[in-house]
Amino acid sequence: AIVVDITSNLCNTEDSDMSNDEEGEESLISYAQEVISMAPVFVKQSCHLSAVRSLSGKELIFKIVCCGKAWTDNNFKEYSNDYVDDLCERASLLWGHIASRGRLPPPAQRLMWGHLVRSSFMLLLEGFSKVSTCSTEGRSLMS
């Protein structure tokens, strides 16, 4: 879409006179610089989305909401909920896959791991926010 937009801008500037040609070239250059400056934002968003998908985000939120009775119980459990075990297992598998391949340099590995951890926290927060009723003990299970 960006290439089509730039091409149409170039075609429009070719039809105009010389004074508009310089003006059009400057606006095209500034447009291209703005597009290039947005690249890090696109990379960050795509990393976040891929991390959520690789963690099975929708399934995790569903599991948190489906705990139902666990959030209203008035006793403490000695073990974690299934969604926590699933999330930890999934993250462990992803880290093993990222680190064992050896294709990514360590900074890229750390960046990917950071996105996975941040996405995990955001998914947990999203799931907890969807729990409608919760006891004090249930809130302590969330921490």
Image (cartoon, helix red, strand yellow):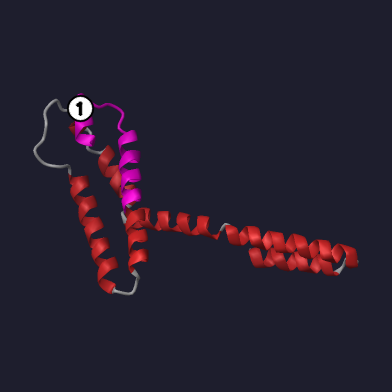
The residue that mark 1 highlights is 72
Toward the left, the furthest residue is: 78
Residue beneath the point at 32% across and 67% down: 106
The stretch in magenta equals 117-143
- Residue 82 image offset from top left, x and y in percent: 18, 46
Residue beneath the point at 26% across and 43% down: 63
Q: Is residue 122 left or right of residue 63?
A: right
Q: Nearer the viewer, residue 131 or 77?
A: 77
Q: How many badges with numbers are in the image?
A: 1
Q: Quadrant of residue 79?
A: top left
- Residue 87 image offset from top left, x and y in percent: 24, 51
Helix, strand, or loop for circle 1? helix
Q: Is residue 62 magenta?
A: no
Which quadrant of the figure contains the N terminus? bottom right
Q: Is residue 127 magenta?
A: yes
Q: Nearer the viewer, residue 103 or 12?
A: 103
- Residue 40 image offset from top left, x and y in percent: 51, 58
Q: Nearer the viewer, residue 28 or 127?
A: 28
- Pointer 1: residues within 10 angstroms few (<14), some, or many (20+)? some
Q: Quadrant of residue 93?
A: bottom left
Q: Is residue 34 left or right of residue 127?
A: right
Residue beneath the point at 17% across and 28% down: 137
At label 1, the amino acid type is Thr
* Dominant secondary structure, magenta: helix
Residue beneath the point at 39% across and 58% down: 50
Q: Quadrant of residue 142?
A: top left
Which quadrant of the figure contains the C terminus? top left
Q: Does residue 134 lie above or below 63 as drawn?
A: above
Q: Nearer the viewer, residue 102 or 65?
A: 102
